[in-house]
Image (tube, rainbow, N blue to C red):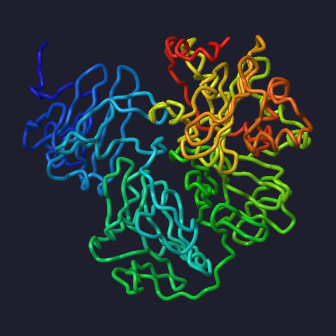
Amino acid sequence: MVWRSGIIAPGPRSLTVTDAGDLSGDGVRLLNSRTSPVDATAMLDAAPAADITDMRYLVREGKDRRHVTRNADGSLRVTTRPLIGGSIVTLPEPLARWLEQDGTVLTWRQLPDRDGTKWLTLCLIDDDDDVIWRQEMWDLSVMLPPAVPHAYGGPALGRDGRLRHQSLTSASGSHTLVHQEDGNLVLYCNPAHHAAWATDTWWAGDGWAELTGDGDLVVRNICGTPVWRSGTAGSGAQRLEVDDDGSVALRAADGSVVWDVRVHAPCTAAGMNPARGSVLRRGQRLQRQSLTAADGGTVLAHRDDRPLMLFGEDGRWLWDQYIWDAERSYLALDDDGALRVRTDDGSVALELGGPGDELAVVPGEVQLRRDDGTVVWCNGRQMAESESPPEDDYESWLDALVKGRAYCVTVLHEVRPGEALARLGAQSEDIGTGTWQDLQDMAAAADVNDVVVAAFALGPHTLLVEDNGWQGVNSPELSQGTFAVSCYGGIKAGSFFKVFRDGAEVANHSWDNGSPEPTTPEVLQALAAMGADDVIDTAFEHDLELLCRTAGVHPTVSDVTGCARVAILNVEWSNYQRKPSAPPPT
């Protein structure tokens, strides 16, 4: 060695010389040609974001070297340097400024990504050691606290109501307030196709907007941390309204305005014929707006930059349709029943499906269906005519899932799919969204005793399907406050059929030890419709038809080919032994 620079900085892998004479390594200023070496200080592992300057940087050493440096414009540069490759991400200046909160530190934690895999992630931690911000906050699968239902897509949001990827549209359809996937709450003038006002929280990432119980309009990130607020807590605000003149107002119970936005010049331009609630009907359109399932979970959203996106109740993207050269587009269910994306001049940008009479958002799916309920298009896929079963076909849908294997099927009235899985014993962190095939792929690594179960939405009800399981027939608690029917069919002729109400078993017509006397009105009505009189024989030979008729549902193949809420339940063998009325799965 004949010369050493004398510059000390942990592990830089690149050097840059600027026009100002600065020599920097991975964004850290190391030396100036006029003033000699600069003492850049490495802050190890954790520090307040405000402490990161051009002279002080955050670093974490390990298998991958990570550091955070300050750019000249105030933004933060996050660099990851593994042995091969690497990444550089810039946190924009508004976000960097928001991170500089008293009592917080920027550091790295092992946090789950959208698929549940844990990665070392840059995050902001508060005094209580809670994560209030994290990097990569896009499309995270997170179940939010309950919110008060409202007229989805209507002009108003009441207290304790929430918008997540959803919109409010004035009565005439002229103006729309929408919560976008980037975290921005934006007011659009629809006839002029421009944003009239926004919270400018585009840097916050996914989250939601809400009108709190004390009257404050708040935009939150996915961690639940406020990133913007109207500052009207305690004002008596009862509802948020979007008016036809382009104003947005918080109003008290008597209608008086306690806060408003009037940056948009009064506009009375004609609006459009917008859809409301969960259904788009012939002659209506969706533009920068949303349709929401009746339970408030699944959302279909139209955007200028990515025309269609379908979100599950946990916020995960279930389906999307990106169209190049379709700016200022809208989704239309035309008078001929065809579902199309059209450009602003009315020309067709994309033919999606049809013909149908209404486009409806239900839990986990967006369906184009006819007046008789036949689904002709679902989540971007045209349904074949053969997928609509004949009136007496109650088995094709199950054959599409578990043909030739043991199964347990349960219909649970007036309960959402996620709640149904929770009642069956699934923990919230174990519940995901996916197709039946996705669930089978997950099950490949499951234990032999694990129960593989999917929860499909059937209107307001839930259809639980267990592959080689029998939890449903042994779980009367599923029906707490409602009604449920469950049957089990084994490949060795095992058969169970039970009816539950309000958390108790009210009928058992199982093959081995069931009652031959039907007493529940639902079973009696189902037997009459089937022309049967022996309930045990019927439950053994035609269990699915008896179950569906008893529950008042008729599943189709299309009902179980889309996305569902899914889980794998870890069931101890001792649990099977404690329930002698049912055999272990075969």
Q: Residue at x 61, y 57 (%)?
A: 294
**Number of callouts:** 0
Along the line of sight, the residue nearer the viewer: 23 or 330: 330
| Residue 47 vertical placement versus 153 (above, below) | above
Q: From the viewer's perspective, is 522 left or right of 107?
A: right
Q: Which residue is drawn at the image coordinates 9% and 36% (left, top)?
A: 37
Of residues 509 and 88, the one nearer the viewer is: 509
Give percent across and percent down for residue 255.
Answer: 42, 86
Q: Residue 171 in the image: x percent, y percent? A: 59, 80
- Kindly identify the residue that appears in the image at 35 percent across and 41 percent down: 135
Q: Which residue is painted at 88% across and 33% down in the image?
A: 533
Question: Is the residue 341 above or below the residue 8 in the image?
Answer: below
> Residue 496, image x and y in percent?
71, 23
In what quadrant of the picture does the N terminus appear? top left
Q: For residue 446, say whether it is visible.
A: no
Q: Nearer the viewer, residue 390 or 284?
A: 390
- Between 284 and 477, the residue placed more toward the observer is 477
Residue 105 in sight from this viewpoint: yes
Dividing the image into 4 quarters, which one contains the C terminus?
A: top right
Q: x%, y% of residue 386?
A: 90, 39
When the figure is inspected, residue 495 is found, relative to residue 98, above or below; the finding is above
Q: Is 540 situated left or right of 578 in this image? A: right
Quadrant in which residue 451 is drawn: top right
Dividing the picture into quadrants, the one containing residue 48 is top left
Q: Is residue 104 left or right of residue 552?
A: left
- Considering only vertical position in the picture, is 419 above or below 247? above
Q: Is residue 532 left or right of residue 457?
A: right
